Amino acid sequence: MDSSLEGSKSNSEFLLFPLLNIFQVNEMVFARLTSLISVVLAASQITSAALTKRVTCSTGHVTANAACCKLFPIVDKIQQDLFDGGECGEEAHSALRLAFHDAIGFSIHGGKGGGADGSILIFNATEEAFRIRSYLTDANGGIDDITSRQFPVFQETGLTAGDFVHLAAAIGTANCPGAPRLQFMFGRPAPRAPAPDLTVPEPTDSVTAILERFADAGFSAREAVALLSSHTIAAADVVDPTIPGTPFDSTVGTFDSQVFLEVLLKGSLFPGNGSQPGEVLSPLHGEMRLQSDFLIARDPRTACFWQEKINNQALMVSEFKAAMAKLQVLGQRNLIDCSDVVPVPKTLTTPIKFPASFSRRDVDIACPQLPFPNLATVAGPAPTIPPVYVYSQ
């Protein structure tokens, strides 16, 4: 009861019980009204679902919109020609990276590109040449491999570059066990110009610079960390060019939270030719640790967003899917939801583990407010992580 009613009790106690009765009646009425509204909304949703017409395409696929029918054969073609029939390999990892580099060329304030428009594929020579802040750091380093692979397939599909880039990313991600089924929105126009330089965050950047770049594109610190879930299936090709295809965690073929755990392990070695710009000490032979991941995992603005994803597959997947849905439509409008053309990924239910020879004592706890999950340790000696296959042109 609020202070005004307490005051009325002391001054006019005879009014209290009538007031209580009024409040109780009002609460009952409100509760019944709320229940009635809930029933009406539920019935409306059921009716709406029943009235939604599903379309059977000539291929036999069923979709919510006839405009999506043309995409099913294209999905099959992309799987066969880019992803070796549906593998979670280097091409799938790179397609997801390409979609990020394409879409992040955008600002909510304007003047930084068309967003998720496919400009990185059409204007590849321009965007791949960008260098940020240091002659040692190539913003789109390694992207030329995937654009050279994608471009001939893109030309055969009849899609715009933006639709192709972001459809390929959704398909490639779906090939990885544990990944979410990403949204795919269809109908992007052709890109008009390349994105300008200084839009792609670099592993040599400070956490402040990275968060400011994400904020400029419309993303919170939590969403920025969510997008870094992509590193669970990623590898570095150019940070240390002597060891291309060096993964960021020990389970690069599955979309799990292992990367969030292993980035918090104490580092002791460099996997290749010594320290490189954008690289810090790694805990495992054969594993690359980016300076930016290391710092974000330990920064007070982002550490808890990072740590809470360890062994929390549902949280990691749901936040990544939501952030990607936002990323893949930056700068776009009037699109058609064709998400049902995206393959359904295999589920992943097994808990993650510490790599062999590691335990809780090897973790840099950066978010003491959260309990750290209890994890088992893989049996055996400390592993050497093999590189992922790197295709040649």
Image (cartoon, rainbow, N blue to C red):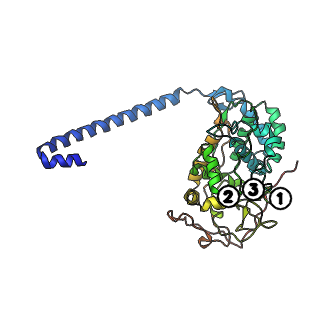
* Residue type at numbered disc 3: Ala
Task: Give 314 or 3, whichever is nearer the viewer.
Answer: 3
Name the mark nearer the viewer: 2 or 3. Answer: 2
Mark sitting earlier along the chain (2/3): 3
Classify mark 1: residues with Cα within 10 Å, few (<14), some (14-19) or many (20+).
some
- Residue 92: assigned label: none
Q: Work out how far the residue at label 1 is from the one at label 2, CA to CA, in angstroms.
A: 18 Å
Residue beneath label 2, please? Answer: 292
Query: Could you tell which of marks 1 and 2 lies nearer the N-terminus?
Result: 1
Amino acid at circle 2: Ser
Secondary element under disc 2, as helix, strand or loop, is helix
Q: Which residue is mark 1?
A: 241
Identify the residue at image location x=44%, y=31%.
Answer: 43
The residue where tag 3 is placed is 235
Q: How many marks?
A: 3
Q: Position of residue 370 (x, y in %)?
A: 51, 62
**Image quadrant where residue 168 sits:** top right
